[in-house]
Amino acid sequence: MIAANIDKIKQQINKDVQLIVVSKTRPIQMLIEAYNTGQIAFGENKVQELLLKNKLMPSNTQWHIIGHLQSNKVKQIAPFVHLIHSVDSIKLLNTINTEAIKNNRIINCLLQIFIADEETKFGLSKYEAEDLINSNAFDKLLNIKITGLMGMATNTNDEEKITNEFAGLKLFYDKLKQRQTHNFELSILSMGMSSDYMLAIKAGSNMIRVGSSIFA
Ligand SMILES: *Cc1c(COP(=O)(O)O)cnc(C)c1O
């Protein structure tokens, strides 16, 4: 089932859209089943769970943090995390930078941009994001790189509303893409999950995070 579901999604999407299999809450056997199809990119939102799974998965597994990340949890994932999708403050970015230095690496991050009309979702407004990247504090960070943006649309059946939210993020992405510095160079637009990834891709997403339609 899992293999067939991954295959079906990969047939729907173009080669330049990357699939992140969201494996949060799923048992390790299911991740291995997905891995055996050739899938190496997995998304988790809890550090503790990610650490356990990292011990059990093959070493070339690429781990994506997709949920809200607390600063005090960064240390444990800094040695190996592939991409953090959910950066929403300079404080968190500072911590990631510090831990990246200790591990002698550069950690790639996405800024999570708030595009939905729901109050429960984390993220920066576009204004806050611009403020962050224009700050002196940001310029001093040498061991992180912002490689893209992540956003989640409102949880609704209104396709026009979802499309508008994704389109707004794509516009912002295109604007920021023109800027290139030592720690800022965008190539990833992470938007779309099980319910809306086709709409996201139509709006310009090149990275989708899909869980339930693979595992459910
Ligand atoms: C859980 C989650 C997903 C995947 O959602 P599905 O509906 O299961 O595909 C994608 N992105 C984030 C940030 C998530 O927390």
Image: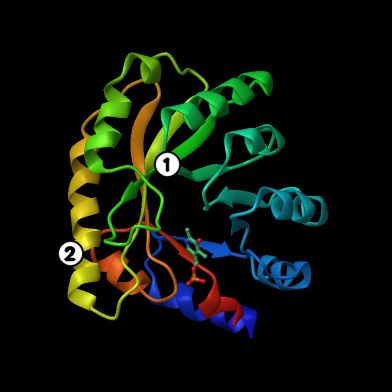
Kindly state the secondary structure of the residue where label 1 is placed: strand
Q: Do residues under tags 1 and 2 come within 8 Å of each other at their CB atoms? A: no
Q: Quadrant of residue 121?
A: bottom left
Residue 105 in the image: above or below residue 146? above
| Image coordinates for residue 125, horizontal then vertical, percent | 27, 43
First reached walking from the N terminus: tag 1 or tag 2: 1
Q: Residue at x 67, y 39 (%)?
A: 77
Residue on which disc 1 sits: 110
Which of 87 and 171 lies nearest the eye of the viewer?
87
Residue that protrudes farthest toward the front in the picture: 119
Left or right position of 210 against 43: left
Q: Amino acid at mark 1?
A: Leu
- Quick check: is the Cβ at mark 1 less than 8 Å away from ligand 1? no
Kindly state the secondary structure of the residue where label 2 is placed: helix
Report if residue 22 is visible in the image: yes
Residue on which disc 2 sits: 164
| Image coordinates for residue 182, horizontal then vertical, percent | 38, 20
